[in-house]
Image: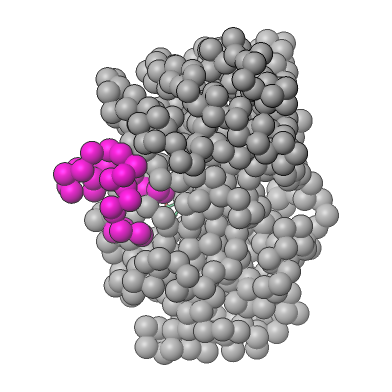
Amino acid sequence: MSATTIVSSPGKVLAAGGYLVLDRAYSGVVISTSSRFYAVIESGDGASCGANEIVVRSPQFNLAEWRYEVTFVDGRVRVEQLETSKAPKTNKFVHLALQHTLTLALEIHGGDPAVLEKDLSHGLDIAVVGDNDFYSQRAKLESLGLPNTLASLSQIPPFSHNDVQLSEVHKTGMGSSAALITSLVSALLLRFSVISPSDFAETGSADRRLAHNAAQFVHCLAQGKVGSGFDVAAAVFGSQLYTRFDPAVLQPLMNDDASESRALAPILSSPAWNYRVEPFCLPPLTRLVLADVDAGSDTPSFIGQVLKWRKENPEAASTLWASINQSNQSLAKRLLYLSQAHASHPADYESAVRRISDLPPSEWQQHRKDPNLSLPAQVILQVFYLVYEHAQAIRQHMRSMGKGANVHIEPPEQTALLDACMSQAGVICGGVPGAGGYDAIWLLVCEVPGTPEEQRPLHRVERVWSTVKDLSVSPLAAVESTAHGARIEQLDAIRGLREAIARG
Ligand SMILES: Nc1ncnc2c1ncn2[C@@H]1O[C@H](COP(=O)(O)OP(=O)(O)OP(=O)(O)O)[C@@H](O)[C@H]1O
Ligand SMILES: C[C@@](O)(CCOP(=O)(O)O)CC(=O)O
C-alpha cells in the first residue's frame, strides 16, 4: 500500500430526466463533469493524530476539521467524534462514511480487526477538497475586481479557500456531497484492502459496483432518504443513461438502528442492486457549458410537490411523463448517433458543425440541403436540428410539469435567459438541470478548434450572460468528463492538490 491513497470523483448534470428518474420505469441523461472531488488519505504518522484516530480536514473552509476515534468491541467497529475536533458542527456525511465503510471492511475481513488496526496504527489523515466549480466563486471574483467570466475563473487558483465555514458556503448544484462521499468511501475501501486498485479501475467490475453500492447507501443515510441516486452513479461511473435501483434493496438499512446492527456486506454486494448504467457521451466538436444562476431553489420541496401532483392527477401525469420520456430518449439517441456519425464520417461531421456554428438553430432547417455540404453532412446537420427540437420539447414539457405542480421548474426568468441563449449562432440545446428552479442552466454549444474568439458560440453565450437583466449568471469552468467516473490519482499529477491539502 503506497503512503497516499487518492480517489477523485466527478460532479454531475442531469440534463434530461429530472423527476422521471425517481421512477425505475424511466431513465435520465446524466453528464459527468471535469470538476472533481478528491479524498486524500495519508498515514497520520503519529504526529497529526494518534493510533486509531482519523482526522478529516476540509482545507477550503474555516474550522473544518473533524477528529474521530476508532474502537473495536465485540467484533464491531465504532467511529466516534472526539471533542478535540476544531469544527463547531458535526459532519454527518463524513461521519457516516467512516462508520459504515469501516464496518463493511471489518465484515469483509471476517470480523478480524487486525487488518484495520494495522492500517490505523499511526492514525489516518484525510483531506477532502473539491474543484472550485462546486462552490460559487461570485464573491471571490468580486473581491478580485474581476467580471463573471470563464476567463476570470481561470485566474482563481485551484481548490481555492472559500473564506467561510462549510455551512455558509453557496453550492452550485454540481453534487458536492455525492462526489465527496464517493471519493471518500472508495479511497477507504482501497486503503483497507476491501477492493483492489486494478478491479476498481474497471467500469463494470465487482469492486467498482461495491464502491457504488456503499457510497449510495452512505449518501442515502446521510440525506435521510433514498433519492434516485443519479448523482452517486455519475460520481462512480461517469456520463451515462441512468436507470435507478429499486429502493427496497436499501430499506433494511435505512434506519439508524438497523444500519448499526445488520450486516452490510450481504446487502451491499447483493445482486438485488438493479440500477442500469448505459454508455453515454456528448458528441465531438461540442462543449457542455454550465452556469450558476443567482438564487438557489428548495429542491426537496419541489420534489414533494411534483410527486404529490403526479399522485393526485394520475392520468394527466402519465400522459406528460410519457411525452417527456419520449423526448428524453430521442434526445439521448440523437446525441449518440452524432458520435457515431463523427466516427464514420469525420470530415462531413466537421463541415456540418462548422455550418451550424454560424447560424442560430431556428435557421438550421433552411440549410439542410445546402449544396456546399456533402450528403452525409446534410444528414448530420439535420440530426443536430432534431437534437435542438427534442431539447426544446423537453423544456416545454418541464414547464407544463411545473405549471401542474405549481412550482417553477423553469421559472420565467430562466425561460427568457435560455431563449436568449438559444437564439445565438452555434448553440445547440440547453435547459435547467435536475430539479430545475433558479439554480443553474446547462447548454451544449458547437466548439470547433481554431474558430476566432469573436465567432465562438461560447463567446456569444457569455455576451448574453453579461447583459441579462433579472438574474446574475456566473459561468462554471466545467466541461464534460469522459474519464468514466471515479479514479485513483497521484498527488503530484493534480495541479494545486499538494498545496491545498498542506493548508491547515
Ligand atoms: N468540502 C467538504 N468537506 C466536508 N464535507 C463536505 C464538503 N462538501 C460537502 N460536504 C458535506 O456534504 C453536505 C452537503 O450536502 P447536500 O446534500 O446539502 O449538498 P448537495 O446537494 O450535494 O450540494 P450540491 O449539489 O449543490 O453540490 C455538507 O453538509 C457536508 O456534510
Ligand atoms: C428531481 C430529481 O430527479 C433530480 C434532482 O437533481 P438536482 O439535485 O437538482 O441536480 C431528484 C433525484 O433524481 O433524486
Residue positioned 52% across, 73% down in the render: 490
- The number of numbered badges drawn on the structure is 0
As for residue 137 lying within the magenta part, the answer is yes
Quadrant into which the N terminus falls:
bottom right
Residue 426 x, y percent position in the rendering = 49, 25
Q: Which residues are magenta?
A: 133-161
Q: Is residue 440 left or right of residue 226?
A: left
Quadrant into which the C terminus falls:
bottom left
Seen from the viewer's position, the closer of residues 51 and 25 is: 25
Residue positioned 37% across, 88% down in the render: 47
Residue 306 x, y percent position in the rendering = 57, 22
Residue 179 x, y percent position in the rendering = 52, 54
Instruction: Say above or below: 228 vs 202.
Output: above
Q: Does residue 165 appear anywhere in the picture? A: no
Seen from the viewer's position, the closer of residues 18 and 441 is: 441
Q: Does residue 454 appear anywhere in the picture? A: yes
**Location of residue 472 (image quadrant):** top left
**Location of residue 28 (image quadrant):** top right
Residue 450 x, y percent position in the rendering = 46, 41
**Location of residue 183 (image quadrant):** bottom right
Residue positioned 28% across, 45% down in the render: 152
Instruction: Say above or below: 458 vs 260.
Output: above
Q: Residue furthest front?
A: 372
Instruction: Say above or below: 110 vs 398.
Output: below
Q: Residue furthest right?
A: 271
As for residue 335 lying within the magenta part, the answer is no
Q: Is residue 298 left or right of residue 325?
A: left
Residue positioned 53% across, 12% down in the render: 362
